[in-house]
Image (tube, rainbow, N blue to C red):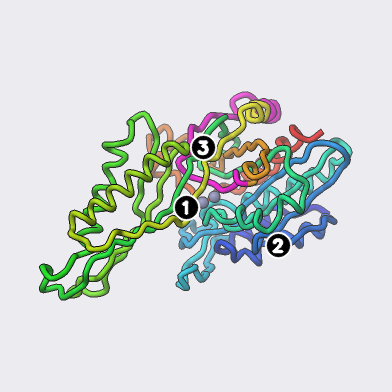
Amino acid sequence: MSIDLESVYRDLHRHPELSFQETRTAGVITRHLEELGLSFDEGVGRTGVVTSIANGDGPVVWLRADMDALPVAELTGLDYASTARGTDPAGLDVPVMHACGHDMHVSALLGALERLLATRNEWSGTIVAVFQPAEEYGAGSHAMIADGVLDRYPKPDIVLGQHVTPLPAGIIGVRPGTQMAASDGLTVVLHGRGGHGSRPHSTIDPVVMAAATVMRLQTIVSREVDPRDVAVVTVGSIHAGLKNNIIPAEAKLELSLRYPDDEARDRVLEKVERIVRAEAIASGAEQTPTISTDHTLPPTINDADATARLTTAFETAFGAGSVVDPGMFTGSEDVSWFARESGAPLVFWFWGGVDPEKYGAAVAGGTVERDIPTNHSPYFAPVLQPTLSRGVENLVVAAREFLG
Ligand code: ZN
Ligand code: ZN
């Protein structure tokens, strides 16, 4: 009996779960692993699932798929669109959607395990399949490592992972070196002095302080970073005050920072800190702003030799022109902790999920940015096929390349 992967995908898409809440998703995974006759561990790093296939001597290949969804209200109009809701870490009731395609990643890995099991007389070694929670928090791989996943399973000789992306279906994007940016999430609290909205002179207004800080932070990338370098400074959240005639006591900013390497990280973090402090001084603040780090993600760096090997394997399997260099993405990933913590090389690639005709029309019309929804968009919806079957084949080809 083979897994009906399209049904699995539609089911997961209809029932997305927020980070570290992927219990139903884990149940879908373990049910199919049982059907395949595989033993597994549940609750690894809270909600993760891990299984392995030992098949004689040979390399240990880790295949990783992330499981979590996002607080996004789905607008795709698909008949399997999500209407799910969930409770976010702040206790708010929020819509939930697989807006990053992790449902595709889980389905593809299940399909690949089935294929690799069926062909186990053709390869040797060990496959460790890691269904990882909470990638969107940048916390799931750490949680699994803290839970001993690198000790409980054979250490990887290589870590492999993939992400569905708005490239044409059939195309793989991968490059040696930095594939995805490093990232920090910061929370900045600006301390003012509250008071009556009619008496601003008796207060230190954190709203104005926040506004000036947000504007000045924009000059890091535009004025201070070498134009040939990549950096992103986004203020994604700003909160202060409850009422028009009350000047609040503080304002909170949440920042997302991206850079290609650790040196650039140090430089940008220093500039952020300098500007935040200086704007507080400019406002006459009596207390230094509080800056805390919510998460830190390393750059996702593809091993050059392994990437070259895999590119050749993909081109052999899918034809010349099937692999492109997509450039460095400013998005970030926590997959590389598995490789960093074990000293193994990593290859993380992207595969296309957009109808090639639709993509071609958007390119011709110069409307890719407008018409092709990206990951995290409420309209993000990979075309089911051939995206799903290619997701399976990518993993099988990649695993077989590195197994004995
Ligand atoms: Zn995402
Ligand atoms: Zn993602």
Residue type at tag 2: Val
Magenta stretch: give its range: 312-337
Q: Is residue 195 above or below residue 165?
A: below
Q: CA distance from mark 2 to mark 3?
A: 33 Å
- Residue 357 image label: 3
Which residue matches tag 1? Answer: 376
Q: Is residue 16 visible?
A: no
Q: In the rendered image, which quarter is residue 196 located in?
A: bottom left
**N-term-proximal mark, 1 vs 3:** 3
**N-term-proximal mark, 2 vs 1:** 2
Residue 189 % position (x, y): 33, 62
Callout 1 crowding tier (Cα within 10 Å): few <14, some 14–19, many ≥20:
some
Residue type at tag 3: Glu
Q: CA distance from mark 1 to mark 3?
A: 22 Å
- The answer to whether the residues at label 1 and label 3 have Cβ atoms under 8 Å apart is no
Comparing labels 2 and 3, the label whose residue is closer to the camera:
2
Q: Residue at x 25, y 53 (%)?
A: 213
- The magenta stretch spans residue 45: no
Which residue matches tag 2? Answer: 28
Left or right: residue 378 versus residue 390 is: left
Q: Residue at x 69, y 60 (%)?
A: 44
